[in-house]
């Protein structure tokens, strides 16, 4: 067992007794001191020990000062540290079995023999793994989220209040925004790390600034993991967002006025796929394709006919509000037939692709772009995957063409995200996202609501609320009042304005991250149906809000 041992001048005698126990056990010990009776400051030892615990350089630590209180206070300021001040063998055993303590703190006033017995009991005891204790440890760890912004609370209480408010909102409501998710603590830590201090124009090994070895390593990890995750020949992890990733691809191979064939925004596409209010619609000649009015799914024969007629330079496949699987082989066939390149914007489905529950577009497209949040569950950012033959053009367009210094803290968080997505647990997560969406969709369908295309194959669904006499705007507001958060959304051939809409968009990525499964989806679907069937019933809204609060109390955000 790897251990760290430390004391101040008041704990020398006890440390000597504990050292003998560790020697008898054969533990690998790092002795931080103190080694003399000269006065020293206990935080110096507690901080070093706590940092080693957090960085997983040691399995546990034993700290000693005159009362043990100072060491305990200092060590417990670090997220991930559970330091316990113990004065008996019984408390030492219980703090291990009940609290999974990783730091034993002893008072220097203990008899050396007693201290040795306590240390021995602590080290020989393991966490019980009982559900009640594991649940409580989980609550301790969630509480550490607030400690992440403790300095912010002192420096800027107003901004701190918004962070706390967001955390409370996430914990007390049901988030069904299809483009949102809940990232891991590791992703948050990388995002908020000292890597934000580094300016690093260029690419790993080819920077304009010196001192880039750490960020070169982080960016290289992100690139390698992205390529492995999606089977890509080349990856550029520098785009600040999905929109800039799309822009970079366009500018790499197109000239202003070139023709792009893409899904219309009001049919489920995205702003950057050619909306007139977006740069893409202003710089390029956009030919939109639509879903079938009868089936509300893509009509690939009609798309092919349009492509052969208009001969686009680039075809864009991908959507922000399309609930069905995209046929990438068919898009490839269409592109080849008209001599076009194919770009797939998989921003919404990237996590499902990574988890193996949606086909991978990489083998079929010259370019694949995505955001790194949404179903991929990473930081807010962009990613470009492309064939090696386009790598230089894409990299040159991203930098220096469109961006200056990359956000290396976010790139490190992307690396963490890709690493998480490579784990078997992520595949199970992606499967559950889809299963949850289907369960929620089935519940709403059973209550008489029409879903665009008749259902869902992925993480989202579009509910046509106009058929029940509602607008998307009113429906989303009513659900928000009940603690269920979704967004108004246009549906194909919508007669209402984009500010009013005839539909709402619902997604299951975030609730799945929180651990919810099909039974919870059925409850949520019932609440949605109840609210939308009786919009003016304030008593019902309050009742559902209370039930939502009770449910979310058992599914706190990680």
Image (cartoon, grey):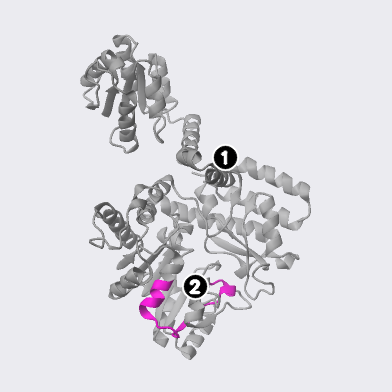
Give the left or right position of residue 381, taking residue 36 as reference: right
Corner quadrant of residue 18:
top left
Disc 1 element: loop
Which label sits in the foreground, 2 or 1? 2
Q: Which residue is mark 1?
A: 554
**Considering depth in this image, is 227 or 300 the residue closer to the camera?**
227
From the viewer's perspective, is residue 277 above or below residue 31? below
C-alpha distance separating marks 2 and 1: 39 Å
**Location of residue 133 in the rendering, given as x and y in whole percent from the top left corner:** 48, 29
The residue at the point 43 percent across, 21 percent down is 94
**Considering depth in this image, is 307 or 393 the residue closer to the camera?**
393
Precedes in sequence: disc 2 or disc 1: 2
Q: Which residue is mark 2?
A: 272
Give the left or right position of residue 449, taking residue 389 as reference: right
**Location of residue 65 in the rendering, given as x and y in whole percent from the top left corner:** 34, 18
Give the left or right position of residue 225, taking residue 372 as reference: left
Asked if residue 268 is among those painted magenta in the image, a careful observer would answer: yes
Disc 2 element: helix
Q: Which mark is residue 140?
A: none
The residue at the point 32 percent across, 63 percent down is 227
**Location of residue 253 in the rendering, given as x and y in whole percent from the top left corner:** 36, 79
Disc 2 and disc 1 in contact, CB within 8 angstroms = no
Q: What span is in magenta? A: 247-269
From the viewer's perspective, is residue 130 above or below residue 319? above
Within-10-Å neighbours for mark 1: few <14, some 14–19, many 20+: few
Asked if residue 507 is among those painted magenta in the image, a careful observer would answer: no
Residue 96 visible (yes or no) = no
**Location of residue 384 in the rendering, given as x and y in whole percent from the top left corner:** 37, 67
The residue at the point 50 percent across, 80 percent down is 282
């Amino acid at each position: 067992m790897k251990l760290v041992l430390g004391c101040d001048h008041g704990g020398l005698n006890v440390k000597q007794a504990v050292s003998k126990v560790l020697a008898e056990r054969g533990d690998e010990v790092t002795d931080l001191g103190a080694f003399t009776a000269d006065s020293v400051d206990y935080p110096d030892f507690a901080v070093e020990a706590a940092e080693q615990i957090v960085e997983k350089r040691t399995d546990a630590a034993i700290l000693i000062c005159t009362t043990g209180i100072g060491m305990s206070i200092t060590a417990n300021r670090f997220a991930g540290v559970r330091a316990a001040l113990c004065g008996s063998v019984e408390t030492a055993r219980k703090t291990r079995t009940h609290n999974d303590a990783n730091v034993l703190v002893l008072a220097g006033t203990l008899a050396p023999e007693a201290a040795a017995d306590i240390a021995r009991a602590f080290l020989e005891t393991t966490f019980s793994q009982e559900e009640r204790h594991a649940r409580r440890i989980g609550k301790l760890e969630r509480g550490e989220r607030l400690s992440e912004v403790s300095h912010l609370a002192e420096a800027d209480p107003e901004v701190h209040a918004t962070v706390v408010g967001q955390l409370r909102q996430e914990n007390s409501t049901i988030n069904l925004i299809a483009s949102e998710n809940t990232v891991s603590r590791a992703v948050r830590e990388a995002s908020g790390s000292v890597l934000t201090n580094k300016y690093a124009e260029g690419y790993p090994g080819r920077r304009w600034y010196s001192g880039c070895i750490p960020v070169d390593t982080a960016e290289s990890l992100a690139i390698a993991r992205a390529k492995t995750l999606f089977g890509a020949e080349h990856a550029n992890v520098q785009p600040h967002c999905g929109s800039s990733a799309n822009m970079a691809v366009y500018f790499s191979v197109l000239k202003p006025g070139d023709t792009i064939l893409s899904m219309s925004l009001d049919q489920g596409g995205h702003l950057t796929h050619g909306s007139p209010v977006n740069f893409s619609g202003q710089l390029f000649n956009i030919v939109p394709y639509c879903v079938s009015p009868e089936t509300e799914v893509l009509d690939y024969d009609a798309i092919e006919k349009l492509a052969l007629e208009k001969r686009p330079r680039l075809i864009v496949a991908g959507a922000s509000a399309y609930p069905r699987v995209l046929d990438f082989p068919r898009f490839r066939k269409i592109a080849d037939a008209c001599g076009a390149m194919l770009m797939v914007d998989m921003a919404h489905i990237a996590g499902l692709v990574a988890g193996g529950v949606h086909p991978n577009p990489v083998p079929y497209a010259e370019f694949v772009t995505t955001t790194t949040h949404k179903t991929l569950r990473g930081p807010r950012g962009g990613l470009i995957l492309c064939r090696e033959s386009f790598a230089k053009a894409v990299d040159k367009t991203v930098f220096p063409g469109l961006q200056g210094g990359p956000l290396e803290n976010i790139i490190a968080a992307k690396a963490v995200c890709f690493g998480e997505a490579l784990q078997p647990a992520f595949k199970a997560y992606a499967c559950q996202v889809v299963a949850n969406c289907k369960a929620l969709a089935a519940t709403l369908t059973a209550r008489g609501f029409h879903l665009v295309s008749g259902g869902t194959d992925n993480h989202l669904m579009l509910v046509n609320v106009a058929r029940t006499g509602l607008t998307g705007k009113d429906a989303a507001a009513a659900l928000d009042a009940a603690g269920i958060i979704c967004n108004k959304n246009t549906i194909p051939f919508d007669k209402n304005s984009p500010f009013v809409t005839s539909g709402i968009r619902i997604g299951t990525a975030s609730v799945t991250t929180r651990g919810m499964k099909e039974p919870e989806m059925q409850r949520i679907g019932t609440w949605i149906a109840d609210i939308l069937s009786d919009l003016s019933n304030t008593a019902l809204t309050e009742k559902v809000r209370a039930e939502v609060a009770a449910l979310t109390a058992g599914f706190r955000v990680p």
